[in-house]
Every structure is written in structure tokens, then in C-alpha cells.
Image (spheres, grey):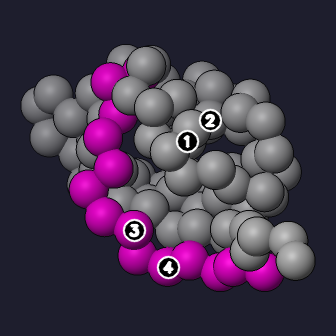
Amino acid sequence: MEQPKIIHIVLDVLKPHQPPLPDFAAFVGELAGIGRVDVTVVEMDEKTESLRIIIDGNVDYESLRSHMAKQGAVIHSVDQVVVE
């Protein structure tokens, strides 16, 4: 039997202002298995942005976490997960 896969995940993420949002979203979308990335800025302060990121595809959570860390982004919480 196949292992269940995360096909949809909603994250609360903190990232520095750089890279800009379009570049960061495209960077996240480069990860293997990711089909769609939807990023919304929830809050901004002097140095960081709080983001709500919705990702659809075949998501490997650990790979996603380390991929985003390359841009200085940290996952604060996982707010929703759909597994298939």
C-alpha cells in the first residue's frame, strides 16, 4: 500500500523582506512535486513579513521546510493539511 501524501498544506511563515514576494513564491514553486503556490502577506514589520502560504501538489514537508530556509523563511505553524 502506498504511503499517504500531503496534497494541500497551509502554512504561517515568517520571512525577511528580501527576496521580494514574487521571487519567493517562484522559489517555493521550484521544489519538486509542487503544483501551485498561493502567498498572502498577513503582516509586515521593519524587517520581516508574516505570510499565509497555501501549497498544492505532492508536498514533502521536510524538503519544503529546508528549501524555504535557504531564503531565510521559517514555518511558524501548519494551519491545515490535506492528505490523500
Q: Name which of mark 3 and mark 1 comes first in the sequence.
A: 1
SS for callout 1: helix
**Residue type, label 1:** Leu
Residue 45 vs residue 71, the one in the foreground: 71
Residues in magenta? Answer: 71-84
Tell whether position 40 is magenta: no
SS for callout 4: strand
Relative side of 43 to 55, left or right = left
User: Cβ–Cβ below 8 Å for labels 4 and 2?
Assistant: no
User: Cβ–Cβ below 8 Å for labels 1 and 2?
Assistant: yes
* Residue for badge 3: 78
Q: Name which of mark 4 and mark 1 comes first in the sequence.
A: 1
Q: Name which of mark 1 and mark 2 comes first in the sequence.
A: 2
- Whole-angstrom CA distance, mark 1 to mark 2, is 8 Å
Kindly report the secondary structure that dominates the magenta region of the rendered protein.
strand
- Whole-angstrom CA distance, mark 2 to mark 3, is 16 Å
Examine the rendering and report whether any part of residue 17 can be seen: no
Q: Position of residue 16 (x, y in %)?
A: 28, 27
- Whole-angstrom CA distance, mark 3 to mark 1, is 12 Å
* Residue for badge 4: 80
Q: Position of residue 57 (x, y in %)?
A: 80, 58
Examine the rendering and report whether any part of residue 69 can be seen: yes
Which residue of the protein is positioned furthest toward the left in this rendering?
Answer: 46
User: Cβ–Cβ below 8 Å for labels 2 and 3?
Assistant: no
**Residue type, label 2:** Val
* Residue for badge 1: 64
Residue 69 vs residue 19, the one in the foreground: 69
User: Cβ–Cβ below 8 Å for labels 4 and 3?
Assistant: yes
Task: In the rendered view, tell whether residue 44 sits above or below residue 17.
Answer: below
Say which residue appears at 15% left-offset and 28% top-offset: 47
User: Cβ–Cβ below 8 Å for labels 4 and 1?
Assistant: no
Identify the image quadrant of the N terminus: bottom right
